[in-house]
Amino acid sequence: MANPKSTAHQDIVNGSGGELHQKATETTITTNQGLAIADNQNSLKASPRGPVLLEDFILREKITHFDHERIPERVVHARGTGAHGFFELTESLAEYTTASVLTEVGKQTPLFTRFSTVAGGSGSVDTPRDVRGFAVKMYTDQGNWDLVGNNIPVFFIQDAIKFPDLVHAVKMEPDRGFPQAASAHDTFWDFISLTPESMHMIMWAMSDRTLPRSLRMIEGFGVHSFRLINEGGKSTFVKFHWRPRLGVQSTIWDEAVKIAGADQDFHRRDLFESITSGNYPDWDLAVQLFTQEQADTFPFDHLDATKLIPEELVPLKVIGRMVLNRWPDNFFAETEQVAFCPSHVVPGIDFSNDPLLQGRLFSYLDTQLSRLGSPNFHQIPVNTPKCPFANNQRDGHMQMNQPVGRVAYEPNSLMPDGPREHPKGFESARVEEKGVKGRIRSETFNDHYSQARQFYMSQTVYEQAHMASALVFELSKVEHVHIRLAIVGHLQHIDKDLAQRVATGLGVRDMPMPPIAAAPVQEREPSPALQTIGKLMPTLEGRAVGILVAKGSDCALVGSMVSALAGAGASHKIVAPHVGEIELSDGSHLEVQGQLAGTPSVMFDAVAVILSDEAAVMLCNEAAAVDFVRDAFGHLKAIAADAGAQALLDKAGVTTDPGIVSMQNIDQFLEAAKTRQWAREKFVRTLA
Ligand code: HDD
């Protein structure tokens, strides 16, 4: 039997191209030493059926490299996706900072942004209930500035010394290796129940914020207070906010669970498809600026990362926008190897004393050393500053640079043109510190419940019900009853009704005593800016509609729906019982983009069902079709249907409401599709 041979091998044998072929061309497959490979299909054997020879250096090189392809995944935020883009400043902050990225209006600064989940491993699904990481590396002309934030403006803990405990508690339990990418288990809630400072973050985590519809529709927060320092050395506190121009949008829990089964890569694919199709996602960058004097009047300590500054107290000022417009060439080289460190700042930006931030300043640089294996990780292209940089650091694993000369120290007299200090280089804020050294938690960090309550009270009734149900779901997975009770105890400080709903949902008969609060719970004005539903943008841009068709569907109706969606800025997919083409009512053929069983309605924001009477009756016996409609209804989506589809709608239990629209009223459907039919929810599921 003839051995399969590579093209390169054939070329060499045939002598095509008229070369001698000892030299590799650009398309020749070679070893890492540049040696052209004649046979990439067979290892070197002592005889046709004999043992493989140790001599086979080509086999050994290939397998050795393969064996070392993986690097340690991130200890948290392992699952992520990223893209290139730019930041453009629209309003100068020159009054507050010397950072050129924040002072030169119109300047475009290249950047790389990586989004992530927190708890799951790198191969976990995109849609668990989890916080999303939102890390931006800006390649400014004064050095790299990394803003390493989350889609939630507060954090679980106040002091970095608790971070390993938090992460160990939420990650899969060490004796059993599960659950993967889930907080619904004993160790997480055990730690939380004993960490009252986490209650505010828990409210966010149990809200729909942790179930994003798309990474293009999440907010980003720098979380901590940072400092801006101006020309005169004056410093102003700042909080950074990314605001998605598509608005904030979430899925609902049942939907997120089903998306996880339908498309593990739902968010990654969504980002990929939007960027590669030219629909570039963008965000406004906004800041909250405040002085020490203002901070002294806040009813909380802004250095405590479990607190946010309500927009009503310090309004947001939009200063620029970020656009993601280029998908990486290579996932590993860029998205996996990108190394963010909150300590990467530029002159004019400095840190606050937030003890969580202070710990982070150490942790990220440290973790890159174990993850990327070398202090030279800044030489990996995605991490390399795009401005000139030079110093006397030398050598180390995988050193790519080849410095010349005999001087690698400073001061020196032997290399007058070598790197020297710059008067406008980075300077820390000049701040006077006084007090007693010690392992102390400031009393100003004691109020653990007031903002948690404010968050809950700011939500719509629908969101409050989602939060109560999320708590019931999570705690029902906790085996230890005392942990469930402890959480219900904390909830009483947040809202008695919430505590009661969760207790009822968990079958708790005697309401547990609330724990002693370190500071009295204060009543705060509700802040609508904290809602998710309130931040939904009434637009179909960036949204997707699934159109279910089958043989004989009305051609004119399909055509008018497709063009109406295009006009409204929505994308669409034709879903049918089989891929390929579907024959429509007029005998024309329509290309199908999704096979019904593999393209459930959870992939869409709204659906249209256009079927002949005959097809609808047939699809009543097809579970995927019934689920398509039933789930769209259950997930509170708008459904447009023609008369023929009625049999399927009936089978799926669809009842009439403003979101169920006849195909004759496409405009009404387009309006209904811009939101969810929240009022429907009480008819389709029992919430806590
Ligand atoms: Fe962290 C990764 C965000 C607290 C230690 N963190 C990481 C990433 C994001 C955040 C978005 C992924 C970056 C990427 O895409 O590569 N982390 C936060 C936020 C926090 C926070 C918003 C609180 C406000 N983190 C935090 C603390 C510590 C860490 C308190 C340690 C003391 N975080 C890490 C880390 C990671 C990380 C272990 C893992 C991978 C990496 O750094 O590069 O160093």
Image: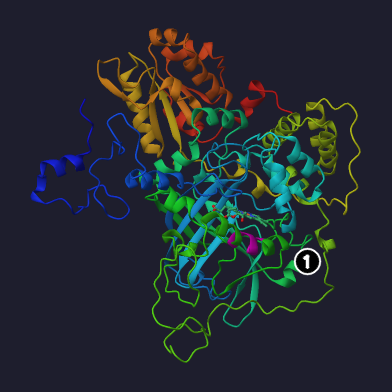
Q: What residue do we see at 70% from left, 38% from top?
A: 173
In terms of image quadrants, where is residue 295? bottom right
**Residue 654 on the magenta segment:** no
- Residue drawn at x 83%, y 42% is 490
Q: As displayed, is residue 656 above or below residue 103?
A: above
Segment colored magenta? 360-365
Q: Give the x, y percent position of residue 590.
A: 29, 23
Residue 382 percent location from the top left of the image: 44, 59
x 48%, y 17%: residue: 624
653 versus 76 height, above or below: above
State which quarter of the image contains the C terminus.
top right
Label 1 Cα neighbours within 10 Å, binned few <14 / some 14-19 / many ≥20: few
Q: Quadrant of ligand 1?
A: bottom right
Which residue is outermost to the left?
Answer: 18
Query: Is residue 670 visible in this depiction of the protein?
Result: yes
In which quarter of the view is residue 441 placed?
bottom right
Query: x, y (%) of residue 575?
Result: 39, 23
Residue 309 placement: quadrant: bottom right
Could you tell me which secondary element the residue under label 1 belongs to? helix
The residue at which mark 1 appears reads as: 297
Secondary structure, magenta segment, majority class: helix
Q: Quadrant of the N terminus?
A: top left
Question: Is residue 662 in view from this perspective?
Answer: no
